[in-house]
Structures are given as C-alpha cells and as structure tokens.
Image (cartoon, rainbow, N blue to C red):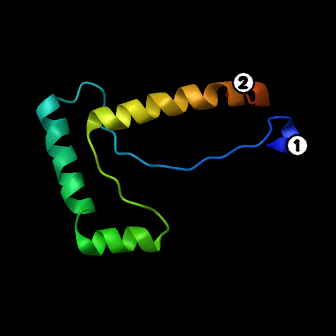
Amino acid sequence: MRELGLGELETSGWAGLYAPAGTPEPVVHKLNAAVNDILALPDVARRVAELGMRPAGGTPQAVDALAREQLEQWRDTVVQSGFIVD
C-alpha cells in the first residue's frame, strides 16, 4: 500500500453470515442463535483456531455495525487507490 502512496496500513479480516433482505426477524434470530451455539462448541472453536481465526459470534446488530464501520474505514482508501468496479 505504501507503493501506491497510501501509507502504512493495518487490517484484519472477518466473515459474517447474512440472510436475504426481508428475511423475517424471528428467522434471523433463530439462525443467529444456532450459529452462536455452533461457534461455542469446543471442537468447532478448536478447528477455527487451527485455521488461524477467532470465532466471535454476536448479534445481527453487531455484524451490521462492524460492516458499516469497515465501509467507512475503507471508503477513502479504495477511492485513493483508483480501483474501479465495473
């Protein structure tokens, strides 16, 4: 990134599970609870850690807030890079 004139850059990745827009709230909450339960299983947590990740779980609202935060954080960097999506 320094070679592109964007200076030092520190980042990390994350992944989330999304449902289609308009999915009924009770369904979203049921899916969220199931995913959180799965991430809490010792075998799953161990395997995720072996892959170099940290299972976090959380709420749909927390994922939304994180996605919005990341969008704001990266918007200027993407614009400065000149990257264009067709």
| Horizontal side of residue 53 vs 83, given as left or right | left
Identify whether 52 is placed above or below 61.
Answer: below
Identify which residue, 73 or 83, lies in the foreground: 73
Lateral position of residue 37 relative to residue 72, left or right: left
**Secondary structure category for the residue under label 1:** helix
Residue 64 lies in what quarter of the image? top left
Q: Position of residue 60 (x, y in %)?
A: 28, 36
Q: Residue at x 41, y 61 (%)?
A: 54
Camera sees residue 14:
yes
Which picture quadrant has residue 55? bottom left
Spatial CA distance of label 2 from label 1 is: 16 Å
User: Mark 1 belongs to which amino acid?
Assistant: Glu
Say which residue label 1 marks. 3
Residue 79 marker: 2
Mark 1 nearby-residue class (10 Å; few <14, some 14–19, many ≥20)? few
State the image coordinates of residue 49 (x, y, percent, origin top left). 42, 70
Three-letter code, disc 2: Val
The C terminus, quarter of image: top right
Name which residue lies at 53% across and 50% down: 13
Sequence-earlier tag: 2 or 1 = 1
In percent of width and height, residue 21 lies at: 30, 26
